[in-house]
Amino acid sequence: MSYSKSQILIDTNRTIASISPLLFGGFVEHMGRCVYEGIYDPKSPLADERGLRTDVLEALRDQAYSVIRYPGGNFLSGYNWLDGVGPKEKRPSRRELAWQSTESNQFGTNEFMEFCQAINAEPMLAVNMGTGTIQSAADLVEYCNVPGGTYWSDLRTSHGAHQPHNVRYWCVGNEMDGPWQIGHLDAVAYGNKALEAAKMMKWQDPTIKTVLCGSSSDKMLTYPDWDRIALELAWEHMDYHSMHYYAGNHDNDTTSYLASVVALERFVDTLEGTLRYVKAKRRSKHDVYLSWDEWQVWYKGDPMQGSWEEAPHLAEEIYNLEDALVVAQWLNVFLRKSHVLKIACVAQVVNVISWMHTRQDGLLKFPSYYVFKLVSNLARGEALDVGVRAPVVETKLYDGVPALDVSASFNAETQEGAVFIVNRSETDPIFADIEWQDRPSVCIRQAWQLAGTDPKETNSWERPDHLVAKEIAAPPVDNGRSAISLPPMSFTVLSTGIE
Ligand code: AHR
């Protein structure tokens, strides 16, 4: 077998920006079995006294989620948050129109806060801009963040939550550009409503950070005008602008699919340009950053409507090797764009378009689980601008792309670093020389690799550990130089320190 030669050049002074810890977030929606039978399942023998599934909690902690966005999603735009608070036996059961399911409301805002505490993640709440009013949005901020002595804060106390939740991150609506959204608006109507909602919400608590709804994907006909118009209207009252994107191998063209980060990178670049344009146009000193608060692979066609069942099986995608390699490159994009991208939430954390599936007696993890876990635990400090020389892979959709997709991080405080390398060639192993140009004393402490021979291979209940990231021998480093062999369709992670 002949190897192609490549080079990875790292200089810890060549930084992009600090990596925001909030890039490793997740999303929990009242959809399918994400909440019920996912994170919350009081009847399960695996549940704790709060009804939270302990095996799910452990896996979420293992992935080091920093922030969780809740409660939707399309669900949000028909949701009255008052249905989900107070004594459980008095909470209404409702027909939920977005996913045509029945919502029991047994899990709501206060249960979500307990869940976030249990996994040590920051809550990110979303307010309804579909059927919801700017008043109900501001009331929820008061309910959550005001210590007491007012109507809504006392109501929270009466529900047993004596301390304020101090929720810092607030999404002002969800995908309001989409005609599928309950109460969909055009960009002008949404920009104006979001501005007025954010004003009231910040009057309730000036320390909160707000997120404007951006385009639901770069395929929307209104993209990127939607973003520009909504931003021009609401700029001064917003801190983040959201992006959503679901990738997929729609034409079963693995070569192009494995290069689809080209489109993801372009999406960020366009929105970064839009942010700069609006800031200049408004003569503003204020900055708005990007929040990629829904991202994942999603295209395999599992049902999306629940026939009015409670916790129906919806969008329970099975993820394979090629999906995991797309996820790995997506995370590389997060690091490479860390100067403008500050929040990201994978949709969703369990069962629904998720790399974890539950059943009564256990939890199954698909290969992307191991990819996310490695990056979210190791990417710390500054993102580095890595130089890469690699053979070119020709693709139908994106022309020629380098076979290697790489990102790296370095934490000056601990002197620890990490390198994340995808070989997206389906056929060619690559032998890469790695050079730390400013650090002759660097050593590789640990290395892991996830690799397979068939892009469609994956884990199953019968073979749950078929594709996992395996620890491999750490390659030796001599005077800042090392070399590593990267199999085709592989993800390799190196964690580094100094001798
Ligand atoms: O995450 C599933 C759905 O995808 C969300 O409800 C919606 O925001 C998006 O279209």
Image (cartoon, helix red, strand yellow):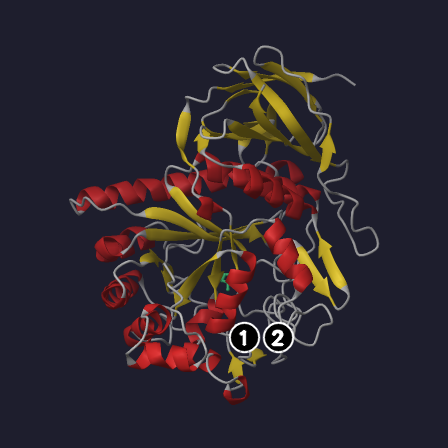
Determine whether the beta carbon of the residue marked 1 sits less than 8 angstroms from the nearest atom of ligand 1.
no
Vertical comparison of 169 with 396: above or below: below
On-image quarter of the C terminus: top right
Determine whether the beta carbon of the residue marked 2 sits less than 8 angstroms from the nearest atom of ligand 1.
no
Left or right of 317 in this view: 199? left
Q: Amino acid at mark 1?
A: Phe
Whole-angstrom CA distance, mark 1 to mark 2, is 18 Å
Q: Secondary structure at mark 1?
A: loop
Q: In the displayed image of the protein, which residue is found farthest to the front?
A: 162
- Residue 475, how many percent across, how many down? 68, 20
Circle 2 packing at 10 Å, graded few (<14), some (14-19), many (20+), is many
Vertical comparison of 101 with 399: above or below: below
Q: Secondary structure at mark 2?
A: loop
User: In front here: 258 or 400?
Assistant: 258
- Residue 348, how many percent across, how many down? 56, 58
Q: Nearer the N terminus, badge 1 or badge 2? A: 1
Residue drawn 56% across and 81% down? 104
Residue 98 in view, yes or no: yes
Circle 1 packing at 10 Å, graded few (<14), some (14-19), many (20+), is many
- Residue 356, how many percent across, how many down? 67, 56
Can you identify the residue that label 2 sits on? 306
Can you identify the residue that label 1 sits on? 107
Q: Amino acid at mark 2?
A: Gly
On-image quarter of the N terminus: top right
Please state which of the two labelled residues, at mark 1 or mark 2, is closer to the viewer.
1
Vertical comparison of 390 with 52: above or below: above
- Residue 429, how many percent across, how many down? 71, 24
Residue drawn 45% across and 48% down? 22
Residue drawn 31% across and 59% down? 208
Vertical comparison of 303 with 12: above or below: below
